[in-house]
Image (spheres, helix red, strand yellow):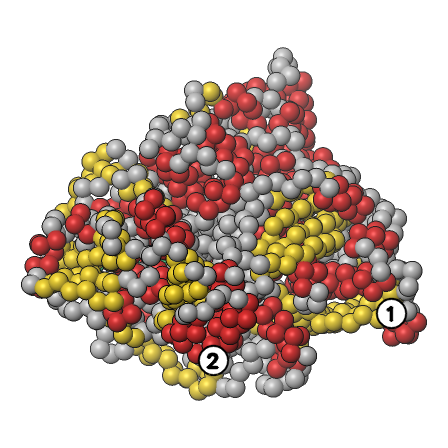
Amino acid sequence: MKIRMQVNGAARELETEPMRRLLDVLREDCGLTGTKEGCGEGECGACTVLIDGKPVNSCLVPVGQVHEAELLTVEGLSDGELLTDVQRALVEHGGAQCGICTPGIAVTAESLIRREKNLDHARIRELLAGNLCRCTGYQRVVEAVAEAAAKRGGAGDE
Amino acid sequence: MDFGGFGQFMSVQVPEFVADGVRWAAMTNSTIRDLDKAVPRVDGADKVTGKALYVDDLKVDGALYGRTVRSHVPHAKLKRISLDPDFDWSDVVVVTADDITGKNVVLLIEEDQPALVPEGGIIRHVDEPVALVAASDPRRAQAAMEHVRLEVEELPAVFTIEESVAKKVLLRGDDNVYKRFEILRGDDVEQALASADYVIEGTYRTGAQEQMYIEPQGMIAEWTDAGAVRLVGSLQCPYYVHKAMRELLQLDEDKVIVTQAVTGGGFGGKEEYPSMLAAHVALLAKKAKRPVRMVYDRVEDVRATTKRHPAPTRHRIGVNKDGTIVAVDVDVLIDGGAYLTLSPVVLSRGVLHSVGPYNVPHVRVVGRAMATNLPPHGAFRGFGAPQTTFAYERQIEKAAQRVGMSSLEFRRKNMLREGDVTCTGQTLKYSVGSAQVLDAVEQQIGQAPPKGSAAPPQFASVKRGKGLAFYYHGAGFTGSGEDRLKGRASVAVNAGGKFEVRSTSTDIGQGTFTIFAQLASAALDVDIKDVEMIQPSTEKAPDSGPTVASRTTMVVGSVVQKAGAQLKQRLLAFAEESGVQSGDVAELAKRYAEKHGELEETVTYHSPPGVKWDDATYRGDAYPCYGWAACYVEVAVDDDTHEVTVERCIHAVDVGHAIHPVLVKGQIEGGTLQALGWALWESVVYRNGRVANPTMTDCIIPTSIEAPEMETLVVEVPYPHGPHGAKGVGEIPMDGPAAAVANAVADALGQPFDEVPLLPEVICRQVSATAAE
Amino acid sequence: MSEFLSPRTLAEALKLRSAHPDFTVLSGGTDLMVRATERDYPVGTIDVFSLKEMRGVCESDAALSIGASTPYADLLRSDVVLTMLPNLHAAIREIGAVQIQERGTIGGNIGTSSPVGDTLPCLLALDAEVELRSQNNTRRVAYSDFCTGYRKTQLGADELITAIHIPRPAKGTRLFWRKIGTRRAQAISKVMGAASFRIEEGVVSHARIALGAVADRPRRVEAAEQRIQGEKPSERLATEVAAIVRSDVKPIDDVRSTASYRLDVAVNIVRRFVLELV
Ligand SMILES: Cc1cc2nc3c(=O)[nH]c(=O)nc-3n(C[C@H](O)[C@H](O)[C@H](O)COP(=O)(O)OP(=O)(O)OC[C@H]3O[C@@H](n4cnc5c(N)ncnc54)[C@H](O)[C@@H]3O)c2cc1C
Ligand code: FES
Ligand code: FES
């Protein structure tokens, strides 16, 4: 099947088996290895990407479903050398240790702070529950996201 | 070998990136000031942008995908391996034990575990590797794997420690014991116990625990024309793999090159198992004459790789009415599984910690590691100490209750202080933070708790409880271990005139690279940006010893510090000799490199003076120093569902000195949650010797909702021989929280709970049983 | 290569469905795609996830209708769902986590009809009807009839689930939900319960009590419902209803929990629901 999609702002066209996982197409065909696989069953969130602005586990999406969609992966978050508030806060607060969960967390958190106001710790904990991290105990991650959210002044885009 | 971006990740530089138009490097352009500060971790930018390359991210042209054919029976004689004649094998490489030209072992402590079970050999657990296949497409490899047939003759199997102790089947020697240790102190323990006012006895059970690093294990191998094998993988200890491969493949030292890829978590799980994976890809790549990659999927990883040893610990403590501890008698058992692997060392640490940080005049500890037909259990953060800490901290709590003292009071009365003597006869000369961690916790309890922890669910009626635990953890290798190991590291001026830290201590998330960069830059008196970290590789760096045992900052860090200082002296001497007029060490390095090329200083670790240990009697200075910690939790137990919510968690840890406060807190918090997970949710279910819940869905770890807001207190009682006073911190946070939780649940429900995980099913069963009485 | 059909309209989707009864119907994929690499690709797929006609929430005087392809995230953002069906809203809020909620759909939950599908006890407690369409027919089946066994449904090979219709709860109705999962998020249920009680003049005039994960399919506890009907809520009533649940429910052991725990908890939460009325 011929798939046309926007990946991190650039148009892509490829011919492939439509039931392949989006995760594999991104990693193997697009060379975007920032999106990670931790489980292949929707559990860990390491494979999170944004499809039309929404956080989704790319291991559960057949690529046939993203024909004509807009995708954002971790590689598309930062503008060149310019880190996003979330990325910067994650580094500053120690929210990334081994880093394998970090791309998924950075992507999910970006969508959260764009969409939701009043992100306090309890709410961040609820919204990040789909991103498992085994290293940090989440404390530094939650603090980083709270700081990045506060920076946006709680002014969500939606 | 063309690893695509591999060249890039071979050297990690301190990031210099721009955020909101502010150059970050501007925040870090100091030298000594970088110590004790949260400089951005050197690999941070790569990790948040997705640039960091983990093993599965490495592009290797022409690499085949390898898969492992496993035994599927827990104990059997392997009679024959055959290939399904109806399957097309033309494009598949198959390897069996017959292809091994060297020694068919995965060398660790003993040579008992084969890389592949040979025909005629014995299968000892259900996921034991028997054959290997590789193909250019992963689905082909999977299909091929399913078409390898095994003919076996099943043997009776042993799945529990109790069955092993009872010698239901003999798996090893005449008693199924891999290793036995004994510690004795004072007079006869039975007599001492008999003289005490009260004797409290209990058996404490702790379950297996899966490391559940988010990146599954993976390894890539390629053979060079010169007959060397290059291995790149997700691993903690490059030289463990190196040693094991030399034996398996019968190769010279320089013919095995092991490099760590960026590694997505280890926690002990990538200490010994990567040697098995390395063996498999190396064998496949040799036969295929092409590079081979093998990355486990989650199910295979959970089933086949090591876990924390399940351990029942029987503990007796004698106390007098005034609250003094008279004697302790402990019987430690751990389930080693099908091969010896690291069980003796895990047992040793469990045994050495089993009396706890208390003054106890009369002690007897006996520990045994038992053989079963479960996949081998292995290294996991804490390394035996969490199991025995759980037992003694439940006992201490019961003893406090019995004598009518508060949890804090009883612990303060009996705790080890500077100058006191441990159960192995070690006099604690320095860096004893026992009083300080308890004080810190007590003070924090008085503060208002932070908001943000989860509340119990809707419609819940709950009972609340509080629990404390207090513990210590020996930093570094046990006894004379460090002297045998002789860990080495180098700091160098490379050909380009830049500083480079060369060690095989790996960064598995804990921040080794950042700490080493800080230590080297401070020792050299240069900007941290001028220091590069090489990706650990046996080709580029000396053996720093394994990245385990909370030893990396304290032991290898001190070596890096010394090497840096020596290098600085060499450069200053060079300045004097050659008449260069500059005190700027970075500038001197450039000049030196221009003139003479590379300059490397390598330092070998020596234990601090006065440390004495006798392996035969298990007496003496068990560890150069100890970390100290106290954990306090508040829980809510749901009356209807018996679910436990951790509503508050205070953890005070004496780390000697926090070289990087943010990284230290991260270590403490990460360890704390793993411990809470082990206490409440994490359960490995075995059915007929096989993990029956091998997915992330079923073998669960806590999410951000389970995790409470952590009140982390970093206590600093410096260790004079550690870099700037630092000592180990990696493992201690794992040791105690489980006991704190069990103490809190017992407090909430008014009855003892002596096992973990305290699944709601366990609480429910016990509460119903008590109600029925 | 497998065939992948992305119909633009419901009519087109129904046509394709009857032309290819052997193709897999795909919505959010959060059930179908789990560990997908372990299986062969299906021969063909009909993707209904983005079908506009099967999305959204529609409120009438009598009922709330939910398009089968509406992702959970959209339902969570819907004020009508929150105010009219707070128990369904609460159930959905606990499904998976945000990523699953953005993709998972109520139609998919019904399509799978697993005993641990979290919306299903709510649908039973709310007397929901499933709307099924084929090219020439539209029918409505009560969810209690739709699910016929362990992951078995009445769905015809030419049919699609197009919507769920939930009657507006009458005035004075109290709705309940409680999930006991392996943990608080990303959790498979060990037991879950949903209930709907209408109280008129201090007496329960209508009762629905439904449980999940305690049988081969989500189920109501009719005997308990009958016991409570016409009664004034009291502690004693709660205890009696609980006793009925204890004798009526026969859960099993598996890797996630035990039969005895499931039973105890099912009993306790039903008791708690009734106590809440006192
Ligand atoms: C990590 C994770 C966590 C989860 N947590 C929960 C949870 O907490 N609670 C819970 O209940 N579920 C949970 N699930 C399961 C799943 O998310 C839900 O069952 C979801 O509702 C499925 O919807 P879907 O649209 O993704 O279904 P799909 O996977 O697309 O389809 C599921 C089934 O329904 C059929 N189907 C779908 N739409 C139609 C239609 N319109 N007509 C006919 N047939 C159709 C499909 O053919 C398939 O058989 C979880 C799944 C994952 C991976
Ligand atoms: S890999 Fe997709 S959620 Fe884990
Ligand atoms: S940083 Fe390692 S899993 Fe999150």
Q: Which residue is mark 1?
A: B198
Percent from the top left, x then y, of residue C186?
43, 55
Residue drawn at 90 percent across, 74 percent down: B194
Residue A86 versus residue B2: which sits nearer the camera?
A86
* Vertical comparison of B78 with B93: above or below: below
Distance CA(mark 2)–CA(mark 1): 46 Å
Name the residue type under label 1. Tyr
Q: Chain of mark 2?
A: C
Residue B76 versus residue C212: which sits nearer the camera?
C212
Residue farthest to the top? Answer: B581
Q: Quadrant of the N terminus of chain C?
A: bottom left
Name the residue type under label 2. Ser
State how many labels appear.
Answer: 2
Percent from the top left, x then y, of residue B435?
81, 45
Percent from the top left, x then y, of residue B524?
64, 27
* Vertical comparison of B770 with C23: above or below: below
Q: Which residue is mark 2?
A: C247
Residue drawn at 36 percent across, 71 percent down: C219
Tell me: B50 left or right of B321. Answer: left
Residue B693 versus residue C155: which sits nearer the camera?
C155
Mark 1 packing: few (<14 Cα in 10 Å), some, or many (20+)?
Answer: some
